[in-house]
Image (spheres, helix red, strand yellow):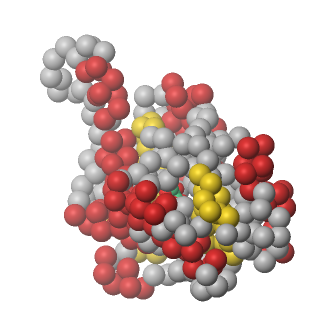
Amino acid sequence: MNVLVTREIPEAGLRLLESFDVTVLSEQPPGRAELLEAAHGADGVLCTLTEKIDAEFMDAAGRSLKVVANMAVGYDNVDLGAAKERGVVVTNTPEVLNETTADAAFMLLLAAARRLGEGERIVRAGEWKAWGPKMLLGPDVWGKKLGIIGLGGIGEAVVRRAKGFGMEILYTGHSRKEEAEREFGARYLELNELLQESDFLSIHTPLTDETRHLIGAEEFEKMKSEAVLVNTSRGPVVDEAALADALESRRIFAAGLDVYEEEPEVHPKLLKLENVVLTPHIGSASIETRDKMATLAAENLQAVLSGKEPLHSVNP
Ligand code: DGY
């Protein structure tokens, strides 16, 4: 059977595919024409979030296509409707990246509050003249209120870290999480109340039609002026232009971003602002976790091609 792997992935995943006829594309995201051409005749595709897997792609693959195994927990790059119409199974890699992504969210939260980027830039530019009683002041993190938007596996892992910092936990989402309420003393609030009460906000919701631009100009108006926003989920959940305005006008104190609306493009205004920490979508980028993601994606693909149930189908 033919398997297309759209990017160079960790060896741990590739090793599991040795019984197939595997084509691995480049380290960088393939161009659209290259991707469509490579899809032809594939029985299975192991892809990443940089590839748009839509009806055109599935038709280019043809009727042999049985499975699209996305090496990511988010699967907004895959058209599930088109997959359903063609009987293609779509899988993802949840859970294995929860702790690592939570580390990254907390890293951004601390870095944005304590102005790590600014400090680094000053030191590297040789502009640090002396210790200063009022130099680079930012809000304390410990003991503050953390609002989680989407208390799933990653959100909960962030909460565990926050408890070590003595933070009070607030959350919003589709449903109440009674176990988390008992375990962490987390308080459920509607989004508007969460925006008003939180000192820190961390977004962990998938990108859907409902969550696109969930946080925009109106929402920034409701937030505290000393609030810090962290996004490690998907860029389009936040209206980037509105965020840039809110940061520029100091409507909020700072932000830490790992994801963007038009990756790898970043809103030009954000690039100029000091009060935002920017990382290039590396939330899950630990050596161990990327191995696990590649392995799980390969296991999902292998299961479907062997006529078995995959571990994590998103369109069962
Ligand atoms: C995901 O898995 O969805 C991340 O964005 C990449 O790790």
Indicate the quadrant containing the N terminus: top left, top right, bottom left or bottom right.
bottom right
Q: Residue at coordinates 59% horizontally, 67% vertically from top-left?
A: 20
Closer to the camera in the image, 48 or 11: 11
Q: Residue at coordinates 36% horizontally, 53% vertically from top-left?
A: 286
Closer to the camera in the image, 6 or 144: 6
Closer to the camera in the image, 93 or 42: 42
Residue 243 in percent (x, y) is at: 57, 41
Residue 103 in percent (x, y) is at: 33, 56
- Is residue 252 among what the camera can see? no
Q: How many marks on residues? A: 0
191 is higher (above) or lower (below) than 307: above
Q: Left or right: 36 with respect to 308?
A: right
Residue 2 in percent (x, y) is at: 67, 64
Q: Left or right: 236 with respect to 277?
A: right
Q: Residue at coordinates 22% horizontally, 64% vertically from top-left?
A: 164
Indicate the quadrant containing the C terminus: top left, top right, bottom left or bottom right.
bottom right
Q: Left or right: 279 with respect to 133?
A: right
Residue 101 in percent (x, y) is at: 40, 58
- Is residue 40 among what the camera can see? yes
Residue 75 falls in image quadrant? bottom right
Q: Residue at coordinates 41% horizontally, 61% vertically from top-left?
A: 12
262 is higher (above) or lower (below) than 182: above
Closer to the camera in the image, 8 or 97: 8
316 is higher (above) or lower (below) than 93: below
